[in-house]
Image (spheres, grey):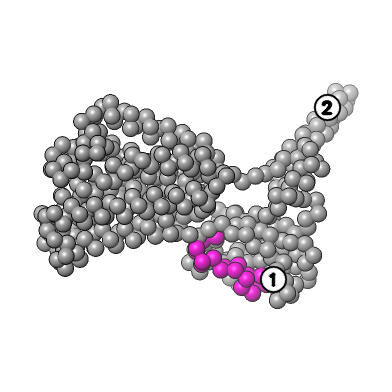
Amino acid sequence: MLLKQKFNICWHYCFVWLAILVSAVAPLQAQVLPLDQKNTINANWLIYEPGSTQLSPYIADLHTGYNAVHQWVSIAPAQPFTISFTAKKEQCIYLNNQLIFVADSALNYTLDLTTYLSRVKPIEGKYLLTVWHPYQHPNVSTFRNKVKEQESRKESAQRPFSVVVREYVNQNVFILFLLLIALLYGGLKATFPSDFNDIFSLGSFSRSSIEKGFLSKPITWSVILFILTFSLSLALLIAAIHTNVQHFVLFNRLFPVSEADITTKILFYSVFIFLFVLIKYLFLRIMGFIFGLEQLVLLQYREFLRTSLFWGMFLPIIMLLYLSFNITQPQTVLFVSNLVVSLLLIFTIIRIFTTVNKKASVLNLHLFSYLCATEVIPLAIMLKLIVFNY
């Protein structure tokens, strides 16, 4: 009996210490909000099941087929209720079934719900917030309370032991990939010195260089490695651009991931660019057969490779610019990065037109139509996906 009492006392003390430990750790996991902020959004989302008379709790892994997700929120008109979220294109937000927001592109947005209270009446003191997309399941996990920076600093000063959650881009991933690219270029120069000189020397743009040396060979392992290094360099810059603008339409439609998953983005873009470069040769063969211009396909593809690989050597320099000034001057860095990618694509097309024009005049309507179908239209698509997607 005495042993049993001692066991109960020990178990009681263990339970008390466990409760203290949990209460000490739990505040670190919650979102830090100012003490005076009453308007908050939480994770208690709801869905409407056909035939039901009330909303049911939303489970992220189970209810992926629903296009509308709801949440009851209390809004105090005297205080701002600003939320931040990542929206897909055409995603809509309703307040008591009244449309208040439509996303014109895939981006991160902030929205103050109190500005719409003048035309929306509460239902028993609450408002039904609805996130709806016409074709896809909306990603409601990105919805957060937007805390003003000044309020967060004030709260931190009042509670010195609190943790302020900040959203920032971890640049360590970019630095590691940039070092990897430098090692790859160094390894290629040491292993394939003649091929390296054929691509990156100034004489590589002479009229006769395309008919000899590196570009005169069929697809070899050195060609594959050079294309892979170029793909990684361009993917790194594109990932930096799209991390800056917070969203990318194509990537999130195929593989929805959080913005923090930069590594996945870089690897996806690298594989996508690598496959694009290789598949383009097959595409040119098909279009050359359709237009009856098979004799220009190899010349056109060699010029595409030569120009792309040459300018790809300068992409790590732009990444250094991004790492140095992205925090202080993000808009300038974004503009320069987009400009460089656009010039790379446009200059490649100009070089292809110039090279083909030496064999046959591009003023010929048939040849000009072929080049528009194989170069200009893909250029417009790439500019839309990479540069003008926001």
In the image, 344: left or right of 167? left
Q: Position of residue 241 (x, y in %)?
A: 46, 49
Disc 1 element: helix
The alpha-carbon separation of the residues under discs 1 and 2 comes to 56 Å
- Asked whether residue 23 appears in the rendered view, the answer is no
In the image, 183: left or right of 100? left
What residue is drawn where x is 50% and y is 63%?
Answer: 105
Disc 2 element: helix
- Say if 292 sits above or below 219 in the image: below
User: What's the residue type where badge 1 is placed?
Assistant: Tyr
Q: Position of residue 136 (x, y in %)?
A: 49, 63
What residue is drawn where x is 38% and y is 34%?
Answer: 181
- Asked whether residue 337 appears in the rendered view, the answer is yes
- Say if 25 sits above or below 64 in the image: above
What residue is drawn where x is 73% and y is 50%?
Answer: 150
Front residue of 347/196: it is 347
- Say if 374 sits above or below 151 in the image: below
Q: Which residue is mark 1?
A: 116
Closer to the chain start, of discs 1 and 2, is: 2
In the image, 86: left or right of 249? right
Crowding at label 1, few (<14), some or many (≥20) Cα neighbours within 10 Å?
A: some
Where does the magenta region start and end? 86-105
Is residue 258 located in the magenta-colored stretch of the structure? no
What residue is drawn where x is 51% and y is 39%?
Answer: 324
Query: Mark 1–mark 2 contact, CB under 8 Å?
Result: no
Q: Of tags 1 and 2, which is closer to the observer?
A: 1
Q: Position of residue 139 (x, y in %)?
A: 56, 57
User: What's the residue type where badge 2 is placed?
Assistant: Cys
Q: Which residue is mark 2?
A: 10
Q: Position of residue 307 (x, y in %)?
A: 26, 46
Quadrant of residue 54 within the rendered picture: bottom right
Q: Which mark is residue 256?
A: none
